[in-house]
Amino acid sequence: MTETTKVQADDLLFYTPRPNIVMTRGEGVYIYDEQGTEYLDFLAGWAVNALGHCPPVVEQALQIQAATLVNASPAFFNTPMLEYAKLLTKHAGMPRAFFTSTGAEANESAIKLARKYGQQCKSHANKIITTTKSFHGRTLATMAATGKPGWNTMYTPKLEGFEHVPFNDIDAMVEAVNEDTCAVMIELIQGEGGVNIADVEYIQQLKKLCEERQVLFIADEVQTGFGRTGTLFAFEQYGIKPDIMTLGKGIGSGFPLSAMLATEELDIFEPGDQGGTYTGQPLAMAVGHAVLSEIIEKDLCQHAKQMGDIIMTRLSELKQHYPITNIRGKGLMIAFQVPEKRATEIVEMCLQNQLLINAPDAQTLRLVPPLIIDEEAIHQFLKRLTESLKALQLVGPFRH
Ligand SMILES: *Cc1c(COP(=O)(O)O)cnc(C)c1O
């Protein structure tokens, strides 16, 4: 990486420190900065660029749609909206779709639909149970749903009606669910929480509990959706089907697109209940259709599983020589633990070594590469990771 002058960004409102790098171009698993420095992207814009950078199918879909119809207004049907809804509901096995632009908006829709259900079908029940360490978005409602430590005191007064219980703890759920509960909202694999995988038994018991108590099961698959975990949706690996599912991130492969899917019985919104200027926006619909078609056609679910298995095996080999532990993941959603408080330092060293990964907390590193990675990319990843660990003198097996 070459030294550069400091990026002048005073005209941007500050909300997070950023490295002194300006990205200009992307191709496949690589992204390039102004100097032409190449970075291996194992973060994919936070699990977003499912098909890598600038995939030809997305470029084509955008070009064709941009020359045909960019915006039709949400008051009309449009062609790509109908086509994408048909394809998506077919593959999800859930017959109703509503489209938005971000994961948080899809979850807002799910929260509204659950409250509507409670109002209509369960004597005005309006409480939603979520789990600790969960992440559901940054709007005020989804922040209230989120179980991130410290978030309960931010931007008060907090939206009411959410209760958090420990993840993977069915007894806590059984205790929390009551006649005021309209829904349970859960990530089957917590992403921002650090790739915490729900047990199959827990999810099956939770689904049964929801059925017994007339409580909706909302799966937040914004991060796990569309092949990332080795199946199109994570719920397929749990032998259940949610009542409502939310999708985002990877389904647009970089274009802002999210969706809420629901059962036929939950087609209960009335005029005025829900909407949005960009719902079913033609460009987004065309991209969504192209991304899903490509994932199915190239069997990228199976590919993600194979590549994920290789990474997991290689990481367990690294364990003999480097202080990494608790390697976990499904498909291409992988995390592991590093010595206490060193995660941020490692991420920074990896950046210097032209590898993008992230640290969901002080001792966890997370990989969510594009689904299109190959063995050469994995080889490069391991090379750049081990160089970074060596540079920080993090060698030898883990010692407590
Ligand atoms: C990222 C994420 C969201 C929020 O998506 P945005 O597009 O940032 O609003 C919601 N749920 C989960 C599980 C996520 O990973």
Image (cartoon, helix red, strand yellow):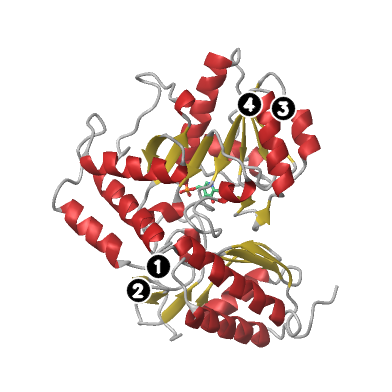
Q: CA distance from mark 3 to mark 4?
A: 8 Å
Q: Earlier in the sequence, mark 1 or mark 4?
A: 1
Q: CA distance from mark 4 to mark 2?
A: 44 Å
Residue 208 lies in what quarter of the image? top right
Q: Earlier in the sequence, mark 3 or mark 4?
A: 3
The residue closer to the viewer here, 55 or 237, is 237
Mark 3–mark 4 CB contact (< 8 Å): yes
Above or below 361: residue 395:
below
Hey, what amino acid is under mark 1? Gly
Residue at the spot x=18%, y=56% of the render? 64
Residue at the spot x=45%, y=73% of the render? 20
Q: Earlier in the sequence, mark 2 or mark 3?
A: 2
Q: Is residue 167 visible?
A: no
Hey, what amino acid is under mark 2? Glu
Residue 389, numbered circle: none
Residue 27, numbered circle: 2
Residue 125 lies in what quarter of the image? top right
Name the secondary structure under disc 4.
loop
Name the secondary structure under disc 1.
loop
Q: Is mark 3 within 8 Å of ligand 1?
A: no
Residue 223 relative to residue 148: left or right: left
Mark 1–mark 4 CB contact (< 8 Å): no
Hey, what amino acid is under mark 3? Val
The residue closer to the viewer here, 11 or 143, is 143
Please name the residue that numbered disc 1 is placed on: 52
Q: Is mark 4 within 8 Å of ligand 1?
A: no
**Horizontal and vertical percent position of residue 308:** 58, 69
